[in-house]
Image (spheres, coloured by chain):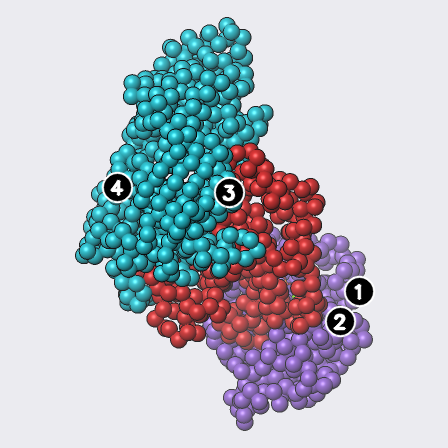
Chain colours: A red, B cyan, C purple
Amino acid sequence: MLALILRRLALMIPVLLGLLVLVFVLTRIVPADPAAVLAGEQASPEQVAAIRATLGLDRPLHVQFVRYLVQVASGDFGTSLYTHRPVVQDLAERMPATIELALASMLLAILVGIPLGAVAAVRRNGWLDQIIRVFTIGGLAVASFWMAIMLQLVFSMQLDILPLRGRVDAGVPAPPFLTGLYVIDYLLAGNLALARHALWHLVLPSVTLALPATATIARFTRSSVIETLQKDFVAWERAVGYPRRVMLWKYVLRNSLSATVTQVGLLFGLFLSGSIVVEAVFGWPGLGDYLFSAITTADYQPVMATTLAIGVIYAVVNIMVDLVQARIDPRVAEQR
Amino acid sequence: MRRRDLLRYSATAGALGALAPIGMPGFAVRDAQAQGAGAAALRWGGNLSRTLDPHTVYDVPSAFTRVNLYDCLYEYAGNPPEPKPLLATETRSSADGKTHDFTIRAGVKFHDGSELTAEDVVYSFRRMLALPQGVGPAFRPFMKAEGVTATGRHSVRMELQFPYAPFFACLPMVAIMNKRLMEANTVNNDWAAAWVAGNDAGSGPYKVVPGSFRPLDSLDMEAVDGYWRGWPHSRPIRQVLCRPVRDDATRLLAVEKGDIDSTHSYIRPDQHERVRRAPGLRLVEEPQLRTYLLRVHNGRDPMNNLDFRKALSYAFPYELFIQRVLRGTAVRSPGPLPVSLWGHPRDLQGYKHDLDAARRHLDAARRAGANVTREITFTALVGFDETEQAAQLLQSELRKIGVTMRIAKAVWANAVQMTQREETSPDIWSHWGSTYYIDPDNWVGQFYSKAALGTQRGSSWYRDDETDGMLAAARATLDRAERQRLYEAASRRLVDQAVDVWIYNGMAYRAVRERVKGYRPGAVGDGLDLRELWLEG
Amino acid sequence: MSMPAPAPAPMLSVDDLSVVIDTPEGPARVLDRASLAVGAGEIVGLVGESGCGKSTLVKAILGVLPPNARMPEGRMLFEGRDLLALDEAALAREVRGRRIGFIPQDPALALNPMFTVGTQLLEIWRWHAPENAPDRSRAAGRARLIDLFRRVQIPDPEQALARYPHQFSGGQRQRVLIAAALLCGPRLIVADEPTTALDVTTQQQILSLLAELARDFALSVLFVTHDFGVVSQLCSHVTVMYAGQTVETGTKRAVLAAPRHPYSAALVACHPDRMADLAGIPGSVPSPLAPPSGCRFHPRCPEARPGCAARPTRLVALAGDPPHALNCIMADAPGPAGALP
Ligand SMILES: Nc1ncnc2c1ncn2[C@@H]1O[C@H](COP(=O)(O)OP(=O)(O)OP(=O)(O)O)[C@@H](O)[C@H]1O
Ligand code: SF4
Ligand SMILES: [Mg+2]
């Protein structure tokens, strides 16, 4: 298992390097001059040129890239032109928020999507399947921001049982930093009330983010359960007298999960990209918000570092997915 | 009513039931809230800059922290706002307008308790001049770091390269920073930029709660006891929690719910009624000096033809735009200056929407050999719907007189890039003339001097010696009456030459909760004086 | 229609059972009044070309027909109980695994790849440990399973429990499945072509193992196969099916030595396996969607005569010993067997 992890981590390096090149090129070929934006409207052309030179943006592209590589290799992801803080520091503040949201959404999507898909498969073409189908199609079709607003209107404005936005209310102190995930950090700090407070703040954004993923997972689970049900071993399990319930929820489901789990890894990318909208609507101070404002001001160091960070999260999650898959399917474990 | 709403929502929200089977008890969020700040705090929902450094950014949100965390030599006061001394108690200017001696108020304390002296003023100006972005670029053309010297513990001399009349209007841009504190936090000659991005080194009425600043996201400030200017109200706001809301829809919900006490000042016209009706809310109208104009490339055929430009000016449907798109939330500004500012000729007529006149000028342009059949391009700004709507209106009017115009889109950073070279600069694009310093020079001087060529300010590619001369003369004299005459003449000349299409002076609108009392908009951006506020109930 | 009434009631009897599967193309009458009997201690070979309905009959007995299948007529008695009267849950609870053991065709696919063999087999024990077992605990099941593994010659029985299906060879997997079938002490074993997927040597080993186990445990066996060689080696009785109909049934000796039905005769003559044509008889098994009327064999039958296409299917007992029954117009003749060539 350890060897597997190490091998996958090693494989990550070329992927991330490729990502780095891509992001670098993208941030340099967009026709937006960071120096001009930074200098502001009052600056003269000479002042802009001076800034450009200070930032090294006047050098040939390959020189800039090598410089950037050297910089990154030494663990320095640069400084934001606007916050004037090391990008790493900004990321350290914001990444946990995004991860917390993505994890909660993933958990929700899995816990709801898999049973939903399995039930739909077992009751194939029955009324329950029809209802679930409507839900899954709806879940994919509904725009996140619309969903977000509906949830806010119903649960926050009308019923007033869930907070509208943010990770905590204004004035509630952040927990001491341990994992960066508020719910967990409050718990570790022994503050149950605030852990609950943070959890309630997590509900609406994660439901919004989870909805399309839940639908996808449900659909995948459904078709893969249906496929599994055709398998010979299911006939055998029936013929030797496994109770139906046990057969479905223990044996068939486990076989179907393999496909679903792969899907979850891919969906995590969806969570990360979807979080841009969801973070904006729910005032969730994560990477999405940060990346958005960095892009709009051509603040290229944060753009590159954030993209890289998202790439790393994505890669790590997919390694974890592989590990889970190896646990589910002994054959996978042996192949690797 | 409530019940019916609920039914309506649950019908539309459809799938929610399936997703939220978690039986949520009426959890008292407020219990947890009570653990944090009480209701006595102002929850400010205006935008936050990405840095608290008052020198390196100069935008609408940064005025909020600059004004309330820092003091400056001058501030804007009165209506219309004029620069008035604040930390300066006395100002003496030489006859040639180049040398200015300031006496600094004694007894002003920084937040760390140390006294503000001439050294701090010198440090602050030198820092501002040294940093490449933000406030510095406005000063650097006429001022060098060596020109700022302390002539005593409480006196400072500033020598300009040449006489520069807008100088005093620029002084409220420069926050005075605590030199000792700044130097203690300087790493690698960075002028403490990294440190002061998240902390304050000021003497203003409020100070930053350490560690509370998260760029774009949150900032906590608390009142400074014994602030030298005093507190006008008996129960001023002790604590200010800045919690900007990024999303338009959520922002309104948040202020309606009372999660925040105020929004930013860009409440869209279509949302005004909703805010006016909402219980506990009021819509505050904040007059703006900000102008909105279409920039026309005067250096390129056919826009280099005066008649063609006049045709453009007559073709734009000003009233329609102001009434339909802005729902009447702006006033027509016929020339390059804000209508309420001195220097704007009161009797200036400018252009009206008149397609017959437009056709006449188009014919004249055609006869003069302008390539009026060329398709021209309007570059609208992504994320600023107004620019696109202006483009569409102009497009349809031009079509009526036989001019074809294409609409392209660019993000701000991209547009800025394009305007740096005459060849790539857009045929037409549009932007706002924001207030940096309140002086006619901020608009007409910055946009139409030859020195502006190669920046987005000079994107009209207008080269006119006479206008340039008037603008330079207006900068060089301290004689206010003479300056006013020159700006009025320059304005008329620019309008006669139809250099750009000037459209309106805007209003800003902010939703503020009723419990916030004493609210008065700031002169520049979000620079309101928080000392004047109190909370009721 | 009626078997010659044998003195003791058979352990399993299927009479005139029809199975109709509703397919998108229409109803397919996959079994048409099929009959079968397995007496105590008998090993009955069920033979017929591919697509004859052998597996369908097995599924019907086990109660695991697909959901779109119906049984519009017929009776099934097992140990005196009417299987058709039991619902799916009751079958799963009381019959399958417990009283009837099942050995599937393809050992490579029959086990769940994601669970250890021990987990899967003990799941059967968990629900079907015999009532009269002295100890019905999991540990007891384990012990019995290890005994059985030893009995079916699986090396390292203890470790074998912790292994996954893909870690066994094909023959070993079939042994595992045999052990699974025997685990809870069933009276009847139903094996659907248990050796077809194996190579010849392994086939032989499995066959002798089955014969040995049947003898030692005094089991009845229903053994589905294509191969008369297997029948002659293993079985005591034979039932021949064609296109969903039972065409001939009797003791091995009677049927193999003197097949009376033209189809059985052809089958015996050529020892067909899956791929081969019936000797001298062109054509193939008709689709159950549009079967020929009357005797379903009549389009191919060299003996066909005018009445065949209208003859209702029924088994007619032949006189004499050993018991032998035939489903053919020739048996309907008033005269005795003499009418046949
Ligand atoms: N689920 C089903 N849907 C439709 N037709 C079916 C289904 N199952 C079986 N059949 C049809 O029923 C007939 C008998 O199938 P069955 O599997 O019982 O044959 P078999 O005698 O076991 O063949 P083989 O020797 O190939 O295993 C075939 O024509 C088959 O196509
Ligand atoms: S009934 Fe007729 S067709 Fe059928 S097998 Fe007998 S002789 Fe042939
Ligand atoms: Mg079969």
**Percent coordinates x, y for residue B385 in the rendering:** 41, 34
Query: Label 3: how many residues lie within 10 Å, few (<14), some (14-19) or many (20+)?
Result: few
Above or below residue B143? Residue A237 is: below
Task: Give the label, 1 or 3, closer to the camera.
Answer: 3
- Mark 3 = which residue? B146
* x 28%, y 66%: residue: B34
Check if mark 2's residue and mark 1's residue have beta carbons within 8 Å: no
Task: Tell me the CA gap for discs 1 and 3.
Answer: 114 Å
Pointer 1 chain? C
Query: Please, which residue is most extreme toward the front here?
Result: B152
- Mark 2 = which residue? C198
**Percent coordinates x, y for residue A155 in the rendering:** 32, 57
* x 39%, y 30%: residue: B95
Mark 3 CB in 8 Å range of ligand 1?
A: no
Task: Tell me the CA gap for discs 4 and 2.
Answer: 86 Å
Above or below residue C53? Residue A56 is: above
* x 37%, y 53%: residue: B116
Task: Tell me the CA gap for discs 2 and 3.
Answer: 97 Å
Pick the front one: A36 or B140: B140
User: Who comes first in sequence, dot 4 or dot 3?
Assistant: 3
Question: What element does badge 4 sit on?
Answer: strand
Disc 2 with disc 1 on a shared chain = yes
Kindly identify the amino acid type of the residue bearing the numbered disc 4. Answer: Val
Query: Please, which residue is most extreme toward the bottom here?
Result: C134
Kindly identify the amino acid type of the residue bearing the numbered disc 3. Answer: Glu
- Mark 4 = which residue? B284
